[in-house]
Amino acid sequence: MSVEILPFTEIYAESVKQLVINVHQEFGFDYDRRLDVDLDKISHIYGGRGGFWIAIDNGNLIGTSALREDTQYTGTLKRMYLLPPFRGKGIGQMLLRHVIEHAKQQEYGEILLDTVTYQKSAVKLYEKYGFIKTGYKGSQLFYQLTLANR
């Protein structure tokens, strides 16, 4: 396995959509165009001080991560997905570290994210990297990572 984390390019647009659909189906979600409009405008939504990255193994898309610029101070981690056969191999950590380093380079003060309680491995990963739970609503969890003094 030789995984690379690369900036998103339009040639991967359909592959990214399919990966998101596959992971959503794995967790019992239907693909909803209204909730996933960013997938039609990745370069626009995640441009500027944000970013969208893809994990590639032997030419195949296996994962994604993104940072959306919310304010000058705050970015939000989005689209953190990894196909099942590649989980537990450190690739999620690679994607997350890439987002955190980019946020530091862009001088963000914090990264926000939301996830759900049943994505236990994701929750464990975020907490390992210092994200603090700031609240919840039903099964949805909200986290924050302060970067200012990191």
Image (cartoon, rainbow, N blue to C red):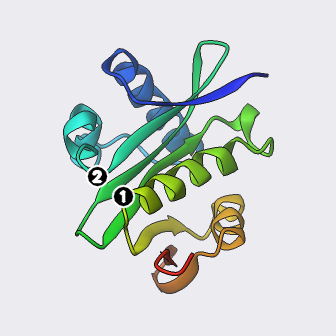
Amino acid carrying label 1: it is: Gln
Please give the name of the residue rendered at 63% of the width and 67% of the height, measured from the top-left corner. Answer: 126
Query: In x, y percent, where is residue 43?
Result: 25, 35
Query: In x, y percent, where is residue 99?
Result: 50, 52
Q: Mark 2 points at which residue?
A: 49
Callout count: 2
Query: In x, y percent, where is residue 67?
Result: 39, 53
Query: In x, y percent, where is residue 89?
Result: 80, 41
Task: Please state, as top left, top right, bottom left or bottom right, where the N terminus lies in the image.
Answer: top right
Q: Do the residues labelled 1 and 2 touch (CB within 8 Å)?
A: yes
Answer with left or right where residue 89 lies relative to residue 34: right
Please give the name of the residue rendered at 71% of the width and 67% of the height, measured from the top-left corner. Answer: 124
Q: In this view, does 56 lie above or below 146?
A: above
Q: Mark 1 points at which residue?
A: 106
Among the 4 quarters of the image, the one containing residue 58:
top right
Count residues near mark 2 (Cα–Cα under 10 Å), then give few for <14, some for 14-19, many for 20+. Answer: some
